[in-house]
Structures are given as C-alpha cells and as structure tokens.
Amino acid sequence: MIDDFLDRELFLSLQAKLLAPSFAWEESAILSEKAAAHLAPSENVQQVHGFYLVKRGIRFSSPTLEIVRPVINKLNPLALLKAKANRTARTDRHIEYGLHVDTRRPGATTAIFYLNTNNGYTLFGDGQQVASVANRIVIIDAATLHTGASCTDAEYRMVLNLNLMLAAP
C-alpha cells in the first residue's frame, strides 16, 4: 500500500477530469447474475468507464486513456491488460460484493488506485481490509482474492482498477 501515490496537483487534475459532468460513465452490473445471488438487484449496480482492455486477442483503447496515464506511467508496466474506473453509489450499509480475482493470467498484477476518501474498503480473502483513501494505491498479485465494499458516508466510492504485467523486482 502506498499513500500519496501521485503528486498532489497531478492527482487533483486526474480526479477533476473523472468528476467532470461531461465524463462518460456507463451503468453496469458489478457481478454476474449467478455471482450476485446474495444481492438485491439494486445493490448490483455500478458506473464504469473502460479505458483499456486486451482480452482474447482483442484490444480496446479509449481516447480517455490519457487521463489515467500518470498512474500507469508511475507503475511502469511491461504491458497493460486492463484499466477501468468503477464508481459505486453510497448505500445504507456496507455491501461486500463478492471475492474474486481480476485475471487468471500468470504473473499478472492488480493495482487498485483510490480516487476518493470514504468509509468503503477493499477486503482481501485473508480478511485484511484497506480503507478507501484518495490517492492511495494497493498493488497485489492478480491471483489474490479481493472485493470492494460500498461506502455509507460519501456520495460514491470511486477506484481505478488496473491489471498489468510488471517487471520482476
């Protein structure tokens, strides 16, 4: 876990772009219908913005990728597999959506970059929790089970989720 990952001005600029009224968000289910059986339909909704995806030989790159380039550049990956922003609305109680892995690609890394401070969190399969603190990043092996949890004290919880291949240390 690294706090103050980006320089303050760079972080505030990135955050402002994602919060701009003109920024395009799409509504999406958080989990598949089968995986979300424990959730009410209204609890299985988030807003997403896909910046980049490579999957099964298909490559998608959004013109908005430049917005999150400072995070990607600082991580300095050998390859970017996915970059996606997730925004979940405030709920009356914390909702832990469901433990999962982002990719099963051997050697891949998942980075969760927190875009606002709230009382939501990331829960890991071993029970560890990381609080949602703006400009914090958590870097984990992509095989690590984790889930997001909604917030109850802010309008939304917003994270940037990255899957990438990093150089060996």
Image (cartoon, rainbow, N blue to C red):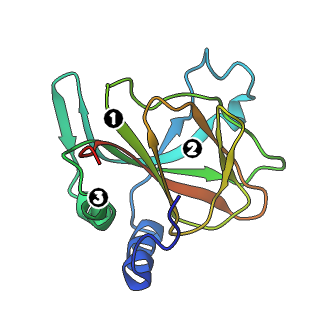
Which comes sooner in the sequence, label 2 or label 3?
2
Q: Is residue 157 left or right of residue 23?
A: right
Asked whether residue 64 appears in the rendered view, the answer is no
Residue type (three-letter) at the residue carrying disc 2 = Gln
Which comes sooner in the sequence, label 1 or label 3?
3
- Image position, residue 8 (x, y; %): 44, 82
Q: Which mark is residue 72?
A: 3
| Residue nearest the viewer, comparing 26 with 4 | 4
| Residue nearest the viewer, comparing 72 with 166 | 166
> Does 134 sit above or below residue 63?
below
Which comes sooner in the sequence, label 2 or label 1?
2
Disc 2 from disc 1: Cα separation: 25 Å
- Image position, residue 111 (x, y; %): 43, 49
Residue type (three-letter) at the residue carrying disc 3 = Ile
The local secondary structure at tag 1 comes to: strand
Q: Determine contact: label 2, label 1, CB under 8 Å.
A: no
- Image position, residue 40 (x, y; %): 75, 29
Q: Determine contact: label 1, label 3, CB under 8 Å.
A: no
Q: Is residue 150 left or right of residue 3?
A: right
Residue type (three-letter) at the residue carrying disc 1 = Ala
Q: Is residue 1 left or right of residue 126?
A: left
Q: Residue at x 23, y 46 (%)?
A: 167
- Image position, residue 90 (x, y; %): 72, 54
- Dot in front, 1 or 3: 1
| Residue nearest the viewer, comparing 3 with 49 | 3
Farthest-out residue, top: 34
Mark 2 crowdedness (10 Å alpha carbons): few <14, some 14-19, many ≥20? many
Q: Which mark is residue 46?
A: 2
Mark 1 crowdedness (10 Å alpha carbons): few <14, some 14-19, many ≥20? some
The local secondary structure at tag 3 comes to: helix
Query: For mark 1, what is the residue?
Result: 108
- Dot in front, 2 or 1: 1
